[in-house]
Image (cartoon, grey):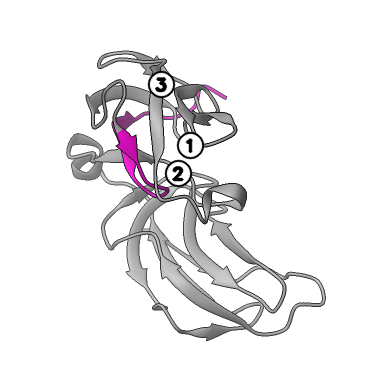
Amino acid sequence: MRLFEIKMPEMGDVGEVVVTDVLIQANQHIAFDQPMITIETEMATMEIPSPKSGVVHEIKISAGAKLIAGSPLIVLREPTAEDIIASELVPAKVPVIGDFRNLISLKVIELLVRVGDKVQRGQSLVTLEADEFLVEVPSEYTGVVREMKVKLRDRISPGGVILMIEETQDAA
């Protein structure tokens, strides 16, 4: 079994950061560039993506941890045949960024995919309406839509699950 330790990346002049949220779980399959943790600096809050795809073997940090560049975050392992057979569905969520932070809910005004549709990373899944703007939510994954968690005119909060995707590998 090949293991890969993922460390906190270098972030320029930023010294210590605080982990505000761990977005993954042990034994979860994560994709390249999938957010693993949310950190907070003196200036901003941001997600740290995985530099590699694999299965989470061990999580070395928790919410509240203080990190510097090079601090161990997680250990990934290559997926086994059993992992591939037992692949989990991954949630497509409303992002919690920018103007969404202070919103209580957004209204689903258009469903752009349905169960069984193949989706590509970056493809729009739904259109949401807030007080003064519309936003299309893109997929963070390539795969097949397996379950819808919202319907037309539902209200959903930032961080809420829109649908479930059976992740497949990018064709790149």
Q: Which residues are magenta?
A: 155-172
Q: Which residue is mark 2?
A: 31
- Callout 1 touching callout 3 (CB < 8 Å): no
Q: Residue at x 18, y 43 (%)?
A: 82
Which of the two discs, 2 and 3, labels the residue nearer the N terminus? 2
Q: Is residue 7 visible?
A: no
Quarter assignment of residue 146: top left
Q: Position of residue 138 (x, y in %)?
A: 51, 30
- Callout 2 touching callout 1 (CB < 8 Å): yes
Camera-side residue of 108 and 160: 108
Q: Tell me the kind of residue under disc 1.
A: Glu
Q: Position of residue 93 (x, y in %)?
A: 39, 41
CA separation, marks 1 and 3? 20 Å
Disc ID at residue 109: 3
CA separation, marks 2 and 3? 29 Å
Q: Tell me the kind of residue under disc 2.
A: Ala
Which of the two discs, 2 and 1, labels the residue nearer the N terminus? 2
Q: Which residue is mark 1?
A: 140
Q: Position of residue 5 (x, y in %)?
A: 49, 68
Badge 3 crowding class, 10 Å Cα cut-off, few under 14, some 14 to 19, many 20 or more, is some
Camera-side residue of 52 and 88: 88
Q: Is residue 80 left or right of residue 120?
A: left
